[in-house]
Image (cartoon, coloured by chain):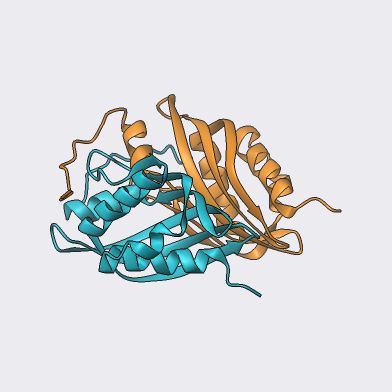
Chain colours: A cyan, B orange
Amino acid sequence: MTEHSLWRFSRALHRAINERQLDEIDSLIDEDVDWAIYGPIDMFPFLGARHGKAAVIEVIRQIAQNIRVHRFDRESIMLGVDSASSMLRFSLTALGSNKPISLRVAHFAQFKAGRLRSIRVLVDSFDLVEQALGRPIQLPRMSSLA
Amino acid sequence: MTEHSLWRFSRALHRAINERQLDEIDSLIDEDVDWAIYGPIDMFPFLGARHGKAAVIEVIRQIAQNIRVHRFDRESIMLGVDSASSMLRFSLTALGSNKPISLRVAHFAQFKAGRLRSIRVLVDSFDLVEQALGRPIQLPRMSSLA
């Protein structure tokens, strides 16, 4: 049984971010890739949508300049033949501020011939913003509990 | 082929929220269920973790008092024998303020004998907070793009 594309992609992405080695990830991304990490792009310009391999490699380079990954735990995972989804919890450092950030992330990925064809990533973006700011945002209570 | 547990659960949850009919969903939840919707619980007390069927039925009742679902589109989905994950985009109304909210959601669910055994839900929580407030939150730019 061959290794699922997710594992190879995941290792290469980790290396790209932490060691700024982009060669391996470059070979694992489809030319026509669709990429989206949903979140506040005003605060984090490396979030958002990208299309095509060149744009995705560039955004991975930007992510590598802004965070370091310390560890991640995969809390849930589903694997299909050419697809994968998981929910993970990351421990990161924001390099600009040297702040530790703990972030829950969900992704849905599709592969084609072993290369990433599309990925959509959802993060607990309010939690991310508060940790990056280093302070809580005051919120009103928006609930009518009867 | 029998219908996947996700479809029956999804229909019953929709009915529970929009019509406040809890009988059907009650029969589709395991006594020992683990439930979590990650998000700012100070603002939305019906988010957060719940354990056990009684607590989950109660929180579904609270969600029904606070939102109405207008439509949802499933953008990605993976089905296993007793598991399912999907990414969806919901159009909601917050009933207290009558505000329309468009929200991206990812869930990972496990079923046992056709009943929900565990579910973890991630939402684009910053986007949710801004829409519920009805105004943008000013954020600094936290990026060192080189």
Q: Which of B110 and A116 is in front in this view?
A: A116
Residue at x-position 17% and y-position 61%: A95
Q: Nearer the viewer, residue A97 or B113?
A: A97
Residue at x-position 32% and y-position 54%: A60
Give percent across and percent down for residue A140: 28, 39
Residue at x-position 63% and y-position 53%: B78
Residue found at the very far left of the displayed protein: A97
Image position of A146 (left or right of B1): left
Residue found at the very far bottom of the displayed protein: A1
Q: Can residue B110 be seen in this view?
A: yes
Q: Nearer the viewer, residue A64 or B80?
A: A64
Q: Nearer the viewer, residue B125 or A141?
A: B125
Q: Can residue B52 be seen in this view?
A: no
Give percent across and percent down for residue B49: 47, 59
The answer to whether A103 is drawn above or below residue B43 in the figure is below
Image position of A109 (left or right of A90): right
Q: How many labels does the image show?
A: 0
**Quarter holding residue B80:** bottom right
The answer to whether B101 is drawn above or below residue A87 in the figure is above
Give percent across and percent down for residue B14: 64, 39
Image position of B69 (left or right of B100): right
Give percent across and percent down for residue A46: 28, 46
